[in-house]
Amino acid sequence: MLGKKSQPEFATALNQGKTFADAKVAESLFKRATGYSHPETKINCHDGEIIQTEVIKHYPPDPVSGIFWLRNRQPTLWKAKIEVKEESVIRIIPWDQLREISKEALEFAEAEHKRLIEGRAERLGITVDYETE
């Protein structure tokens, strides 16, 4: 059976063909990504006469080709997904401390509420009576 292992010249020719094909595709993708122009012959018919006109055909840069090129050529700079590493520190608070923190927070909130109510009442000329029966 003949194959790449038994025919090293054949394997070399295959690899050269693949390299050439890859280079052609890379060149084409680069042209699409950056835009390019080429000569073209326009053929028209006017009054039964065939008219050939040489023109330059322009292709603008294609953003999708540019993105594809950059993501494959420079993946660390242009990859589609950005990985975010996040570190968390978990602090376990004993119940006694947690109760104290909650008590202080509640006292602060009540004092702040009282301060706001008294300030509003003073601006409105109202007397606040906190005595309850």
Image (tube, rainbow, N blue to C red):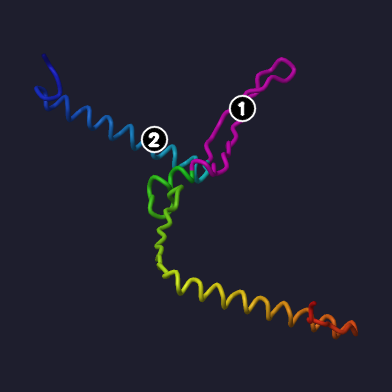
Alpha carbons under labels 1 and 2: distance apart? 27 Å
Local SS, label 2: helix
Instruction: Single out the residue that lies furthest toward the left.
Output: 6
Report which quarter residue 103 is drawn in.
bottom right
Magenta residues, dominant SS class: strand
Q: Quadrant of the C terminus?
A: bottom right
Residue 15 or residue 84, whichever sits in front:
84
Q: Amino acid at mark 1?
A: Lys
Q: Are there few (<14), some (14-19), or many (20+) residues within 10 Å of tag 2?
A: few
Report which quarter residue 44 is drawn in.
top right
The picture places residue 131, in percent across and down from the top left corner, at 79, 81
Instruction: Single out the residue that lies furthest toward the right.
Output: 125
Which residue was labeled with disc 1? 42
Find the magenta span and give its range.
Answer: 37-65
The picture places residue 33, in percent across and down from the top left corner, at 49, 43
Q: Is residue 72 above or below residue 76?
A: above
Left or right, residue 18 beside residue 125: left
Residue 81 or residue 59, whichever sits in front:
81
Instruction: Single out the residue that lies furthest toward the front.
Output: 133
Q: Amino acid at mark 2?
A: Val
Q: Is residue 31 above or below residue 115?
A: above
Q: Residue at (90%, 85%) from the top-left corner?
A: 125
Which residue was labeled with disc 2? 25
The picture places residue 94, in percent across and down from the top left corner, at 41, 70
Local SS, label 1: strand
